Amino acid sequence: DAGITQSPRYKITETGRQVTLMCHQTWSHSYMFWYRQDLGHGLRLIYYSAAADITDKGEVPDGYVVSRSKTENFPLTLESATRSQTSVYFCASTPGQVTYEQYFGPGTRLTVT
Amino acid sequence: GDSVTQMEGPVTLSEEAFLTINCTYTATGYPSLFWYVQYPGEGLQLLLKATKADDKGSNKGFEATYRKETTSFHLEKGSVQVSDSAVYFCALNSGGYQKVTFGTGTKLQVIP
């Protein structure tokens, strides 16, 4: 299917475990993003990427790692999950033309117990 | 730095009522402005946008006008439907692909 997909859609993990959230887009957009959405905080940028092998920190990067070996994939890894990382995670992409409007995936709801 | 302020929700309206969701911003330069909508269980999707002062963005009966003098981009719809129930986010981009700032969102509930 065309568009941007995320997997898994729901995940429950234990404190201290490593977990990877996947993001895949079929538009060949250069730019990709990871956000977390929490009540009272809106959307906060975790990491972003301008192209394959180019990534940079956003507003709340601590405890997360990203990689981008291929343009279409942008996985987010929680190296040692904590309860404070319980959230809904959204991946987004943009073609980066003029207005930089973003296209979002359906989200992954992560619960850390 | 850039910021977006939206009215607090939730906003509850009866079907066919008039909707206004206020959005004001602080930004350097001449930002592009957006409204995104998030339906339950889904990601955000672009509703409308405006790229310069006095531009009006419109889509699905929703409208918003870029007002530089008041630094505002209020969302309006003349007659809301139950299917418009969602969370609405105002956002701006002040230059560069990574420089998107989102408001905290306003939840709209439309009752029959």
Image: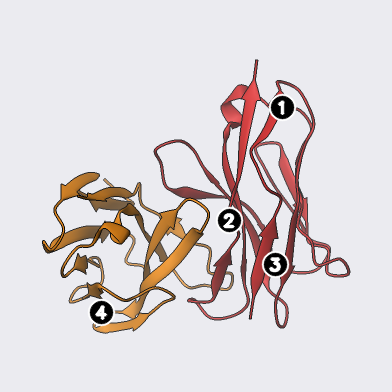
Chain colours: A orange, B red
In this rendering, would B112 be left or right of A79? right
Q: Which residue is mark 1?
A: B13
Q: How far is disc 1 from disc 2 in space, using C-alphas?
A: 20 Å
Asked if the residues shown at circle 4 and circle 3 are in contact, with their CB atoms under 8 angstroms apart, the answer is: no
Q: Give the quarter of the image for residue B103.
A: bottom right
Q: Which residue is mark 3?
A: B51
On what subunit does the disc labeled 2 rest? Answer: B
Residue at the location (39% across, 38% down)?
B41
**Distance between mark 3 and mark 1 Cα atoms:** 30 Å
Pointers 4 and 2 in contact (C-beta within 8 Å):
no
Q: Tell me the residue that label 2 is attached to.
A: B104
Disc 2 element: loop
Residue at which label 4 appears: A52
What residue sits 25% from the left and 66% below the top?
A72
Amino acid, disc 1? Leu
Residue A56, above or below A8: below
Find residue B84 and report its horizontal and vertical position in percent: 60, 31
> Which residue is painted at 34% across and 51% down in the image?
A3
